[in-house]
Image (cartoon, rainbow, N blue to C red):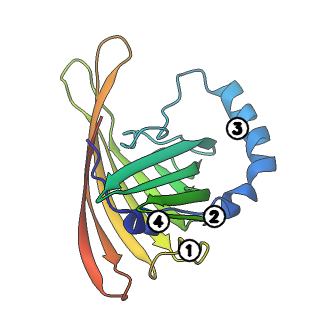
Amino acid sequence: MRIKHNQAAIAQNMRTLAMTSLFASCLFATSAMAQEAKTEPIATDRPDFVESGQVVGKGRFQFETGFNYDRSKADGITAKSLSNSALLRFGFGETWEFRIETDGFIRATTSGLGVSNSQNGFGDTALGFKWQMQDGDDASGRPAIAWLVHADMASGSKEFRGQGTRPSVRAVFEWDLADDASFGIMPGIMLNRNDAGKRYNMGILAAT
């Protein structure tokens, strides 16, 4: 389940790819070395809407990327957005990781009622941490549990920049199922700002 917001709310939560691109050249070399030493399957947080219940492990980099497409229609107006999300994860402990997240370059269009408009730019960057509280256990049905603390910063293009720093806290509960499948649920809360700069609390709930 995903809670949809209008185009302005989506734009506020989009994050810029520019910051992560600085790490691209060294990331792939480090990731390749890490994979040689790591034989177990990796757990990714993308392209899903629910984060995994695991971290990458101490001294390891992991880079995840993809494209997001969103389309909505209301009152004769069609809104579309296309972005290339990216997530850089670095484990600085066996149960802790540092994260840089972005929705990268964004193209947003609105059309209808004889009017058409398009905007291009970069979204905001989010910095955060993830703590793996406990491992999952198939035999007992115990889920893997992780906590995430992020801060979305007003660092993107003017068209997609949010209002100030918006902190959030999320919890992830993930169960392993048969045939390499899994089920996860992620509740959370975010302290957001509207266009006037006034703060308000926004609930987060996703399942997959």
Q: Nearer the viewer, residue 171 or 67?
A: 67
Instruction: Give the CA distance from mark 3 to mark 4.
Output: 31 Å
Instruction: Give the CA distance from mark 4 to mark 1.
Output: 8 Å
Residue corresponding to mark 4 = 11
Q: Amino acid at mark 2?
A: Asn
Residue at left offset 32%, top offset 60% = 5
Residue corresponding to mark 2 = 120
Q: Earlier in the sequence, mark 2 or mark 4?
A: 4
**Mark 3–mark 1 CB contact (< 8 Å):** no
Q: Earlier in the sequence, mark 3 or mark 1?
A: 3
Is label 2 in a helix, a strand or a loop? strand
Q: Looking at the image, is mark 3 or mark 2 nearer the viewer?
A: 2
In the picture, measured across the screen, residue 76 lies left or right of residue 91, that is left
Residue 100: image quadrant is bottom right
Residue corresponding to mark 1 = 159
Residue furthest front as drawn: 114
Q: Amino acid at mark 4?
A: Ala
Q: Residues within 10 Å of mark 3 (few under 14, many from 20)?
A: some
Q: Residues within 10 Å of mark 2 (few under 14, many from 20)?
A: some
Is label 1 in a helix, a strand or a loop? loop
Relative vertical location of residue 62 with respect to residue 32 in this rendering, above or below: below
Relative vertical location of residue 163 with respect to residue 175 in this rendering, above or below: below
Is label 3 in a helix, a strand or a loop? helix
Residue corresponding to mark 3 = 31
Image coordinates for residue 29, horizontal then vertical, percent: 79, 39
**Mark 3–mark 2 CB contact (< 8 Å):** no
Q: Earlier in the sequence, mark 3 or mark 2?
A: 3
Is label 4 in a helix, a strand or a loop? helix
